[in-house]
Amino acid sequence: MEALIKKVAEAYAAFSADAALQCEKGNKAAGTRARKASLELEKLMKEFRKVSLEAAKN
């Protein structure tokens, strides 16, 4: 579970940096990267939910 949390943190950091570049400087490529990172975050968060529920059951 710790590895998954680390992956989520890394994906969020990438998303946050690219989203800030898009907002502050209008960088279109950064916007594309941020959208891609958001999709990855969605997948990771779903996986976290599964793992978290399993841990709560035990």
Image (tube, rainbow, N blue to C red):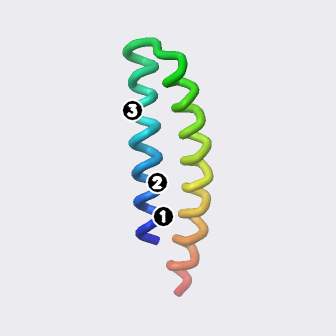
| Residue depicted at 54% across the width and 31% down the height | 33
Residue type pointed to by label 1: Leu
Which residue occupies 41% across, 59% down? 6
Q: CA distance from mark 1 to mark 2?
A: 6 Å
Residue 37 is drawn in which quadrant?
A: top right
Residue tagged 1:
4
> Residue lying farthest top?
26
Residue linked to disc 3: 17
Disc with the residue nearer the chain's start (3 vs 2): 2
Residue assigned mark 2: 8
Task: Tell me the crowding category of disc 2: few under 14, some 14 to 19, or many 20 or more residues within 10 angstroms, Cα based.
Answer: some
Amino acid type for the residue under numbered disc 2: Val
Q: Is residue 50 above or below residue 58?
A: above
**Pointer 1 with pointer 2, Cβ within 8 A:** yes
Q: Amino acid at mark 3?
A: Ala
Q: CA distance from mark 3 to mark 2?
A: 14 Å
User: How far apart are labels 3 and 1 at the CA level?
Assistant: 20 Å
